[in-house]
Amino acid sequence: MVPRSARRKASQLQSGELHSALTDFDLDYRPRRPAHFNPSRIILTRGSLDSSAHRDFIERLCGLYSEAQVTEQLNLPHNRVDLGTAEPVALHYSGKQTLVIGKHQSAVRLSDERANMCPNYWHFSPYGFCPFDCAYCYLAATPGVRFSPTVKIFVNVSEMLDDIDRIARRLAQPTAFYLGKLQDGLALDQLTGYSRVMVPFFASHPYARLVVLTKASDVRNLMEVEHSGNTILSWSLNPPEVCGQFEINTPAPGERIEAMRHCAAAGYPVRAVIMPIIPIARWRDVYGMFLQELITTVPLARITLGGICSYDGALSLTDFKLGPGNTVSRALHRCGFKSADGRRRYVVSERIEMYRHLITAIRRLDPQRPIALCLEERAVFEALGMMGNAGHCNCVL
């Protein structure tokens, strides 16, 4: 059943009463504790207690973590919290155990990728960073995380949706707004219930469309809102053999596939992002068997493939977690130099071989399914005969 508050938002949006329709929270929602996040401290920063609705929301959230230390630092912005250490590894793990709640004043942005084939896209951030602990995580080297690697919830969702409304109406054409560039799009949705506000907003908008990327498996909130096909859900996936080694503290691939199946049955367009492909032992067989399970279980609207494409700061944490001789580092060291966009990638010939193998496996199972590449270089697209697919990847419509 769709909550009354969601139906009310939808009708108001359709009648053009945007500002009265938007709220930061579904006030009827009762938060649930995610299985993969257990913060030891919660820090309230500037703007987090600006309204009674915000205070009620935070009180309910903190009530789930009675064992956590709650402190107020209301004079500080969310990205200036001092975790008491500058050592990168200690800072990283301290941040994973810290939940910061605040406001994000520049949450809606246009990406600025250069020297690769990314089409660039609008993205927004009701969350920051991620409670999961993937060994290859690229977020660890992004500026907002490197200096403030805490898990963040931002309370000014209505301002973000207001910005999205203005941008989308100015563009006056269907436009994707991506949730998943600087966070996992659903990992904390059990806590916040934000999807119960966002999905109805996009469902009734004439131009704005939501694209979510996640590794989460709890999709109960998504089953309770009207989406009108305007929210596209995509899952980051790898075979169990890869997940077990490199995707620490995340839902198992089978749980994610089951969530995808439920969402597809509810009418959501569902996509898969197989990334990063990691050349473990017998990777051809491992990925081939995994793709067969995925494609025969979930009706996918699009599949995007990608390899490791990360910066040195993030990869130094990978070495610490897995040891300097790990599979990822060995594959990257064979290349020996950075790509033009400053990222580390596998040797071009190895990437082409991996993509070609996976594309062949997908085509054998599903000849018509659109396939794209993520953050890849022009030479790879050309070698695979995929220039016509450039710019039709996961983050855009």
Image (cartoon, rainbow, N blue to C red):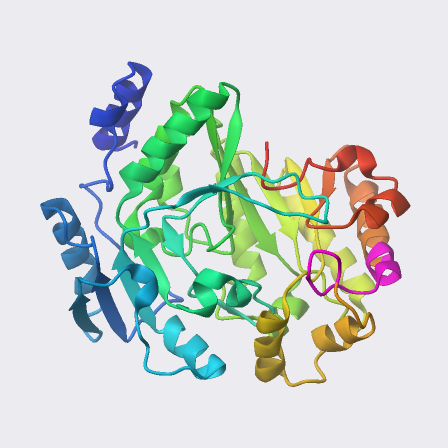
User: What residue sits 82% from the left and 37% below the top?
Assistant: 387
Q: Is residue 253 above or below residue 171?
A: below
User: What residue sits 32% from the left and 71% below the top?
Assistant: 98
Q: Does residue 88 appear to the left or right of 6 in the view shown?
A: right
User: What residue sits 12% from the left and 46% below the top?
Assistant: 51
Q: Nearer the viewer, residue 142 or 383?
A: 142
Q: Is residue 17 above or below residue 326?
A: above
350 falls in the magenta region: yes
Q: Does residue 126 appear to the left or right of 47 in the view shown?
A: right
**Magenta highlight range:** 339-353
Quick check: can you spot residue 172?
Answer: yes
Q: Does residue 28 appear to the left or right of 88 in the view shown?
A: left
Residue 350, by quadrant, is: bottom right
- Image quarter (top left, top right, bottom left or bottom right) of the C terminus: top right
Q: Is residue 90 above or below residue 64?
A: below
Quick check: can you spot residue 33?
Answer: no
Residue 323, by quadrant, is: bottom right
Image location (x, y in percent) of residue 125: 40, 48
Image location (x, y in percent) of residue 345: 74, 63
Image location (x, y in percent) of residue 40: 28, 76
Image location (x, y in percent) of residue 38: 33, 71
User: What residue sits 24% from the left and 42% below the top?
Assistant: 25
